[in-house]
Image: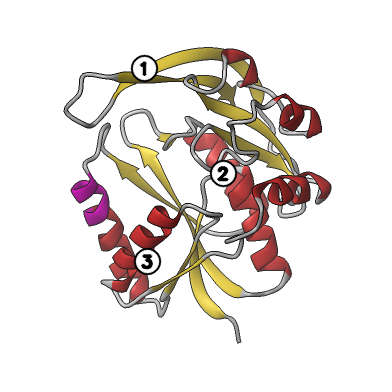
Amino acid sequence: MSKKAIFNWSGGKDSALCLHKVLKDNLFDIKHLLTTLNGKNQRVSMHGVAEELLDRQAKEIGLPLTKLFLPENPSMDEYNELMSSFLSQVKQEGIDISIFGDIFLEDLRAYRENQLDKLNMKAKFPLWGTKTKDVAKEFIDTGFKTIIVSVDSRVLDKSFAGRVFDESFLQDLPLNVDPCGENGEFHSFVFDGPIFRNPVSFRKGDVVYREYKTKNSEPETFGFWYCNLEP
């Protein structure tokens, strides 16, 4: 019997391909999709996708969705406290595995493993160590469809926001940008593919720029271009 697990769901392409592998190979018994959202605007953290579209994804996937709402600019302590509280609850359901779609960021993996270890839980990374160009190709070849919803303006210009993730998109990426945006260069919203019963409908809206302050002591700012998706 497959072990019970939660799946950390961002709504983007790496999450989708990872979930597809888990479901197809019956690796784990997924009891929750878990997503963090900005509590002020009810949008998926970093992606900027509206809560209603996240709900539509979960409905078409057919798995229960748990949403954790974060403060506008949460500290690591606040984030860790909220996550630990939720994980302590799922432990009561006999769940001790948390699945992530991360591919190669060693420091992020170590952080996740350390936090879960405190609760006697294990982290699993089904995509780990795969070349990101291979992940991107497999995602496209498997029949998934996704749209780019946010791009880091430090490495990509406005024109990349709102584009479909396909071979043309990959060919246009600068050489310093990872094919899967694993360093945070871009984020996506998956709207069709083998994990969905039906495509997720939406309308593409305006592309807007939002600026943020760095969390260190230096008064620096950085920005993202967001393509608004309307339910």
Q: Considering the numbered disc 3 on the image, is that residue within a helix, a strand or a loop?
A: helix
Work out which residue is located at the far left of the displayed protein and give it: 217
For residue 94, which numbered disc appears in the image?
none
For residue 211, which numbered disc appears in the image?
1
Residue 24: image quadrant is: bottom right
Q: CA distance from mark 3 to mark 1?
A: 31 Å
Left or right, 58 with reference to 24: left
Of marks 1 and 2, the one in the foreground:
1
Q: Position of residue 97 (x, y in %)?
A: 45, 72
Task: Tell me the amino acid under the disc marked 2.
Answer: Gly
Q: Position of residue 147 (x, y in %)?
A: 67, 31
Q: Position of residue 95 (x, y in %)?
A: 42, 75
Residue visible at 56% across and 21% down in the picture: 156
Q: Residues within 10 Å of mark 2 (few under 14, many from 20)?
A: many
Residue labelled with disc 3: 113
Q: CA distance from mark 1 to mark 2?
A: 23 Å
Q: Nearer the viewer, residue 77 or 197?
A: 77
Q: Which residues are magenta?
A: 76-81
Task: Tell me the amino acid under the disc marked 3.
Answer: Glu
Disc 1 vs disc 2: Cβ atoms closer than 8 Å? no
Dominant secondary structure (helix, strand or loop) of the stretch shown in magenta: helix
Q: Position of residue 185 (x, y in %)?
A: 52, 32
For residue 11, which numbered disc appears in the image?
2
Mark 3 or mark 2, which has the lower sequence index?
2
